Image (cartoon, helix red, strand yellow):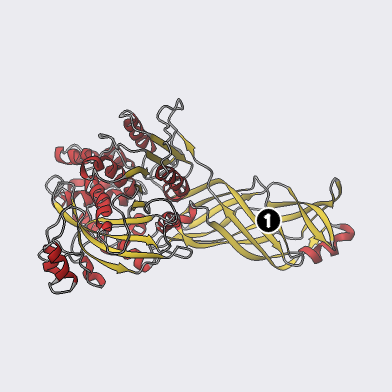
Amino acid sequence: MRRRPFGVRVVCALGVLTAAVCATAGAVPVVGPAGIAFYQPPAPLPTGNHGDLVWYRQATVNLGGGAPKVNAWNVLYHSVDAAGAANVVTGTVLVPAAAWSGSGSRPVVSYAVGTHGLAQSCAPSLQYAQGTDYENANVVAALDRGYAVLVTDYAGYTTGNVPTYLAGAAEGHAVLDMFLAAREIPGAGIAATAKSAVWGYSQGGQAAAWAGQLQPTYLPGLNLMGVAAGGVPANFIETASYLDGSIGEAFLLGGVVGLSTQYPAQIPIDTLANAAGKAAIAQGERECVFQLVLQYMDHSIAEYTVGNQSLAQLETVPSIQQTLLEQDLGGSRIGVPLYQYHGQADEFIPLDQAEALKQAYCGKFESVTFGVYPGEHIVTQFQAAPQVLSWLADRFAGKAAPSSCLTTQPPPKSTAPPGGGDFVVSVNNWPLSGKVHLKTLNQDVVLPAGSTFEADTDLSSERVTGGLSIPKFADSLLIVILPVTVDLSIVPTGAITGTVTLDNAGLLHIHGSAQANITVVSAGEGSLQIPFGCQTSSPVDFPIDFDGPVSSLGDGKLSFTGTTTFPQLANCGAFSGLFSALMSGPGQTFTFTATPPAPVVW
């Protein structure tokens, strides 16, 4: 890292020289312009080493309710693309406002985001300003640990440029150079010796793994303690085939655009794309990920190529094939412990190629722990956060890293549905917790262990169907000042039905209902139970309403809270009036929370 002459530092700090001159002369960091002008690099561009700041500015970020207070900065910094040419990249530095309470310097995590989209407005740094970034939950979880979090936008979100989406080495460089750029921000408190880690999922998993492979030679002085990489597209040809003609076609189209931007001679997109392809490219460069996924699902690459060339045909072109192979991972060691993870039902990134990546790293004597999560791609992205952060905390604490390289278990088999068809996120027998608050008694009835929730959320047809399963259970209620044990059953009378949508900001909207009969099976004290068998005269209608971030599917915050009316209870004999008075009527409230099943290690 070059050092700046003292005299130049002084005159720049006093504002004697212009920003351009100071930046060129290697001066103190320059404050960049407000607004979108920040994303227009200065001309001429100041020279610098990779990781050097071009400029920075304080930023206001909206990370959602419950996020800790942070100091935030946007950065524009020097980096290197996949071909080894210098470029500039934007990003965001987030540091908790609370002082670090652990030993040593505050740990630093470079968080590599997943696919956001090719439009400039999709860049995480711009999404944070609007409060619309769909990965906020993971970033907040890391900030809650007290870590500084660095988020690169990746190359191409500067004004007038196109992201080099899925160009692995460029992404890895951008992730690593954030560590250097963040150190130069006055007052950020990012120590050069701080314990550091890289974490990413999906595109970010690819970027994290590339950063891990590149770090020993590209940034050897980094105090890197571990890499966490999930949902990794490690084998591009296999992943491309998995996406083509399926619900993930938008990712394949984005990859074609991104790689052709990085490698224009190898993938001459202007001569390969037909009129429909050029229109799709133009649209892709204007929109963000969730909008594109729903628009292009189940289409095929052949629809967009001259002569309707198929993906398999394109992959036989030597320059295209070589470019795809150059993005593959596993050819080099990472050199620090790796936590790799994947969803067993991942509908976008094939599980078997992720398992092959694990075996490739293990074959190089890496320390690899491979977590297998039961859900699909989006669910796994957020369900894994607590395990990832616990694993990182152990690395920062200097604990020996576990490894599952020597497992005797066979590789898990994918449970993802066949490619094509509707975009359905399935929730299969997830543990259900919750309670019903009885208004008159002012007491809670807690759902028993073993309760489950299932649903198919069809984002194509915008319909949700599912069900509840609640075992018969006993709860203690105070009835007329006497503690009474009541055996209850809540039995659904039909499927949960309703609507579901996913908006362009990554907000999930579910609106439906579940109907169930509530039965007082018996009541008494201890083993002295009087059988009743009385139940609500008609089913109770539980509104199933949720409006929140898509991350809630995996982070344990998929909760349905509402108010309902319990009909009169019938068939209670002489006690019908009493039970109806105490347990019926409007204003009964409830909360049901579904959480995904626990992962396993392979």
Task: Please provide percent x and percent y for residue 36.
Answer: 24, 70
Dot 1, how many residues are within 10 Å of its Cα: few (below 14), some (14-19), or many (20+)? some
Q: Residue at x 31, y 62 (%)?
A: 125
Horizontal relation, residue 37 to residue 385: left or right = left
Q: Is residue 358 visible?
A: yes
What amino acid is found at the position of numbered circle 1 in the picture?
Ala
Q: Is residue 273 visible?
A: no
Horizontal relation, residue 242 to residue 435: left or right = left
Task: Please provide percent x and percent y for residue 78.
Answer: 18, 56
Residue that extends furthest to the front in the rendered view of this protein: 6
Q: Is residue 291 above or below residue 356?
A: below
Can you say which quadrant of the picture contains the C terminus? top left
Horizontal relation, residue 582 to residue 598: left or right = right
Residue tagged 1 = 516
Residue 178 quadrant: bottom left
Q: Is residue 164 above or below residue 337?
A: below
Residue that extends furthest to the right in the rendered view of this protein: 574
Q: Residue at x 79, y 64 (%)?
A: 582
Camera-nearest residue between 75 and 415? 75
Camera-nearest residue between 335 and 13? 13
- How many marks the image carries: the answer is 1
Q: Secondary structure at mark 1?
A: strand
Task: Please provide percent x and percent y for residue 477.
Answer: 78, 57
Q: Is residue 257 above or below residue 14?
A: above
Camera-nearest residue between 559 and 429? 559
Task: Please provide percent x and percent y for residue 57.
Answer: 27, 68
